[in-house]
Amino acid sequence: MGSYALTGGATGIGAELKRQLTETGHEVISVDIREGDIVADLATAEGRRAAVDGIRARAPDGLDGYIPCAGLPPVAKPLSLIARVNYFAAVETVAGLRDLLALKRGTALLVASNSAPMIGNDDLFVQACLAGDEERACADIESRDGHSAYAGSKRALVLWMRRNVADYAAGGVRLNAVAPGITLTPLTEQVMADAEFGDAMKQFAAMVPWGGTARPAEIANVMRFMLGPEAAFVCGSVFFVDGGSDAMLRSDDF
Ligand code: NAD
């Protein structure tokens, strides 16, 4: 069966995806700051190196898929941590595992968000991320707000994916992204309990066309499909799994 690695496997969507992949007979290497095969803080250069080296040591014959799922919510502080974990750790580890993925014509599945389209491509923080300038991005975002940090990190992730899709495909690696809507995980619990963001998130959930919030399994089901052989021609896609909220907010923007 397949060989997969993911980050953020301790809780939420990553834990559910790990469970599903393992249950269907695949090997999964899990990286997380809390627990896993590799315990590493992806906000740091050492942690990212430990993650990549640890995965390489455990999967020398290659990877069928890599999912940088670890992420921090808009309420995380300092805001620079959101930039470091959600964007820079994700793209750096994908790049560090590219050759392992190529060995198996594998796929990297980035985890964006339905909030990614809520911020512009020309946003200075998004541009600093895309320029690969981690310190500038971190300095810029400290004077902003949690929504800009979170949505901006996810916007940059999608743009990075789309800009790199042809190059990675030429080297035998499919890049894609999933864009979940509000999903009931520890991350969402933190946001719901927050004095600044909680009410706005509850109001947003009430507006979702297909109703409320997702369960982690409803996101992981789609991710598992995108990672598997039935999605072999899915390349460069951003798959919104958000109960219709993006289509509702941007009906004509396609
Ligand atoms: P979660 O908090 O349950 O899981 C996140 C995981 O990342 C945790 O296991 C945590 O320990 C790990 N992590 C955090 N910081 C880390 C670090 N510095 N180094 C290593 N690991 C670290 O959250 P979730 O909701 O399952 O989120 C998973 C992904 O889905 C994230 O990228 C998130 O942005 C994205 N997402 C979530 C939602 C949602 O509503 N829950 C919506 C859209 C996108």
Image: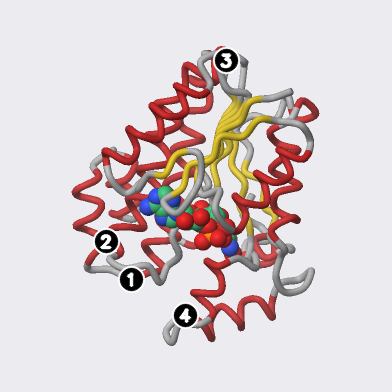
Ranked by sequence position, the earlier of labels 1 and 4 is 1
What residue type is disc 4 on? Phe
- The colour scheme of the drawn protein is secondary structure
Residue underneath mark 3:
172
Q: Position of residue 114 (x, y in %)?
A: 58, 59
What residue type is disc 1 on? Asp
Residue underneath mark 2:
141
Find numbered disc 1 in the image and state the secondary structure of the residue it sits on. loop
* Horizontal arrangement in the rendering, residue 147 relative to residue 219 (left or right): left
What residue type is disc 3 on? Gly
Mark seen at residue 145: 1
Question: In percent of the image, x 62 and y 46: which residue is there?
Answer: 178
Q: Is mark 1 within 8 Å of ligand 1?
A: no
Q: Position of residue 52 (x, y in %)?
A: 40, 30
Decide: is 71 above or below 62. Answer: below
Answer whether labels 1 and 3 touch (C-beta < 8 Å).
Answer: no
**102 or 49, which is in the foreground?**
49
